[in-house]
Amino acid sequence: MEHISDVEIIAPNFKRRLSGVTSTIIQLVPVQRRLGQKVATLGPGLPETLPQIGFLSLLSLWSPPKARTQRIWHARRNLEMLPAIILRDLLRMKLKIVFTSASQRRHTGWSKFLIGRMDAVIATSSKTAAYLEVPSTTILHGIDAERFFPADDKPAAKTMLGLPADKNIAGCFGRIRHQKGTDLFVDAMIALLPDRPDWIAIVAGRATGAHVAFEAALKEKVRAAGLAERILFVGEHTNIPCWYRALDLFIAPQRWEGFGLTPLESMATGVPVVATDVGAFAELLATDDSSPGTIPGTSMGSSVGQLIEADAPEAMMAAAAGLMDDPAMARRCAENGLARATARFTIDGEARSIGAVYERLLNGAF
């Protein structure tokens, strides 16, 4: 446990189950610490390796940390904003509250009430910022290049995972559910693979609760199409960067997304991307030389991949087929995506930008 007097930033995590927010905290906090930001986590569901404080430490928040007059409470959910407001406004503790929003829809009245009482707000994309009714700073998520990097030997990367080294592999990673568009990926592969014997496909992730039947129906559809040996459901894995390194094409078929790291993770591992125009995907794939219409049916051709409309099966099949059938274009997209990810979207850059918000807030610049 960290001593509260040494902690300047509190990163609460009040949801026990793993989520995108939890994953962000797990990846970001060690980088923030390495950069000198005195942050500690609070709450369940986090690795013991992260710096933490206990709930009893909150009784000490009337006293500021060393060399500061106040602390930062960095909330990422509604249920983390409300306690901070109580601590700051009712108990008069020395806190400034930062909220990071990834939502891309109109906020409820309750959310607006909470957000309106923040000292600073961070949006994870320009689309997210457009839904906020308060001033915000846009900071896109970054990628950890020490975890996500290209394979030196692609066939060996495939063999290590028990995948055929002599096949090209298209992948779709994440929770298996309708929102994530897993069915669109499966349908595209059922249509494309019979004419492309040198390709297989993998779905990595798991279905939870009400989505188990959805996954079962997809597996049955694959079996009925006679492709059970070529469209593989490999489950959820902790070594997901290794699975990216085995891919030759990544497809992000989401119908809706708050931010969505999977295209960025793919780019960082040198894999070309087809992604729907949801979340921050357009900002991740957009480049100065993006030009429309390079593949029929797509909404935008980019030098790092293909951006398509959401819930558009024909566009997805056209974009995937274009990259499957043109290795030279796929290679260019992979190279350009890697360069863009490492130049523009590092997790160190994200942490530094967040740190700048903290400093401006503590120095009274907001």
Image (cartoon, helix red, strand yellow):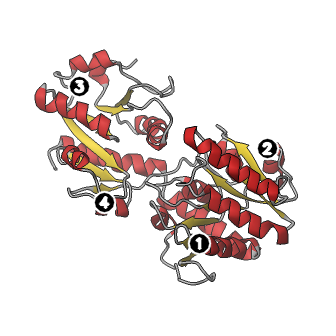
Residue 151 visible somewhere in the drawing: no
Give the CA separation, mark 2 to mark 3. Answer: 48 Å
Query: Can you identify the residue that label 3 sits on?
Result: 65
Query: Can you identify the residue that label 4 sits on?
Result: 129
Identify the mark nearer the N-term, 2 or 4.
4
Q: Closest to the observer: 69 or 269?
A: 269
Residue at (12%, 28%) from the top-left corner? 90
Query: Can you identify the residue that label 2 sits on?
Result: 161
Query: Can you identify the residue that label 1 sits on?
Result: 306
User: Residue 250 occupies which quadrant of the picture?
Assistant: bottom right
Which part of the image, by quadrant, shows the N terminus?
top left
Q: In the rendered view, would you say 273 is above or below 36?
A: below
Mark 4 residue type: Ala
Instruction: Choose mark 3 or mark 1, whichever is in front.
Output: 1
**Secondary structure under the numbered disc 4 in the rendered image:** helix
Identify the mark nearer the N-term, 3 or 1.
3
Identify the mark nearer the N-term, 3 or 4.
3
Q: Tag 3: Cα neighbours inside 10 Å, few (<14), some, or many (≥20)?
A: many
Q: Position of residue 253 (x, y in %)?
A: 58, 61
Q: Is residue 217 left or right of residue 56?
A: right
